[in-house]
Amino acid sequence: MEIKPLNIGGVRLEGNVLLAPLAGYTDFAFRGLCVELGASLAFTEMVSCKGLMYNNENTSALLTVTDKERVKAAQIFGNDPQIMRAACESEHLAPFDIIDINMGCPVPKLYKNGEGSALLENIALAEKVVSECVKSGKVITVKFRTGVTEDKLVTEEFARMCEGAGASMITVHGRPRSAYYSGDVNTAQIAKAKNAVSIPVIANGGIFTEDDATALVEATGADGVMVARGALYDPFIFSKITRKTQLIGFKELIFMHVDGLKLIHPDRWIAHNMRKQIACYLKGVRGGKQAKIRLLSCETTEELKAVVSEVFE
Ligand SMILES: Cc1cc2nc3c(=O)[nH]c(=O)nc-3n(C[C@H](O)[C@H](O)[C@H](O)COP(=O)(O)O)c2cc1C
């Protein structure tokens, strides 16, 4: 695909390949690595605006960010326009240049609360949320799905609403809530969004290779792509798509991720939390299956590294 700069509400990105927000995965160390590998923007995982306002300790760890990310982007969720705006104006989000609003999360806990993808069924409230957040003065973007179910697609209307309410970019995940993360990406719907608005439109869903990225841009006319699970299995996907030369190997990358987390987390926390992420990295790698089982008993980062070293020997 063609790599080109993006202007998001006055914030310039060098390129148009983005790392998606991924709950439980897109920590500051991972995001920094993805940016180094070629991603032009990386989002924190979704953070509850209420958690933010009540100074939840876990929330501030999720919002740790370093200067490895030249442009910094956080994602928040919630459905109370005033609380969402207060979150955007809060000190917690001060380090971030861009705040993305999650209007696509399918999990029942959020959906039943009227948050995440439930806002696709309440466009009037979604509009209030976006326009209040815009009043904070922050650059606001929105990530949403095509609809709640396949027979009630709202992509075009929702895209127009976001632009009208002052959003500076939208990302369309080309699946409805009902599909969660499986099934085809509805490229026609993403194309409709692209044709309906003049702010940048980013296409998301099903990018696992460089060719997938090219095909998605060609089919949708989108201004850029957002890679999600594909980056968990292979963060080098960013250098492949952007054709950026890479000097480090997979083992070094994993070690850098583990060591990066030491900035704020104790060793045992890292050992436990990196098990699932290293398991993703080892998907498809020879010897990866047996290593994944051994990872489960690792209690220190030294033990984790020993398992990884053996796989890449
Ligand atoms: C484990 C996991 C966590 C996710 N967390 C978030 C999140 O915090 N915010 C969000 O907007 N989307 C989240 N998503 C959705 C992804 O950002 C993306 O839209 C979706 O996975 C489709 O892209 P893909 O087919 O390339 O994986 C998550 C997806 C997965 C699999």
Image: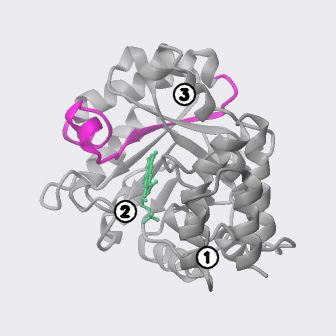
Give coordinates of residue 282: x percent, y percent: 60, 73
State yes or no: discs 2 and 3 in contact (Cβ < 8 Å): no
Q: Residue furthest left?
A: 151
- Label 3 neighbourhood size at 10 Å, few (<14), some (14-19), many (20+)? some
Q: Which residue is mark 2?
A: 190
Which type of secondary structure does the marked residue at label 1 adopt?
loop
Quarter of the displayed picture in which ligand 1 can be seen:
bottom left
Image mark for residue 157: none
Q: Is residue 100 above or below residue 170?
A: above
Indicate the quadrant containing the C terminus: top left, top right, bottom left or bottom right. bottom right
Q: Does any portion of residue 286 appear in the rendered image?
A: yes
- Label 2 neighbourhood size at 10 Å, few (<14), some (14-19), many (20+)? many
Q: Amino acid at mark 1?
A: Met
Give coordinates of residue 154: x percent, y percent: 23, 51
Spatial CA distance of label 3 from label 1 is 36 Å
Q: Which residue is mark 3?
A: 59
Q: Amino acid at mark 2?
A: Ile
Residue at image location 56% in from the left, 77% down from the top? 290
Residue at image location 70% in from the left, 78% down from the top? 311
Q: Is residue 107 magenta?
A: yes
Give coordinates of residue 59: x percent, y percent: 54, 27
Which type of secondary structure does the marked residue at label 3 adopt?
helix
Between 283 and 270, the one lying in front of the other is 270
Q: Magenta span covers which residues?
A: 94-122
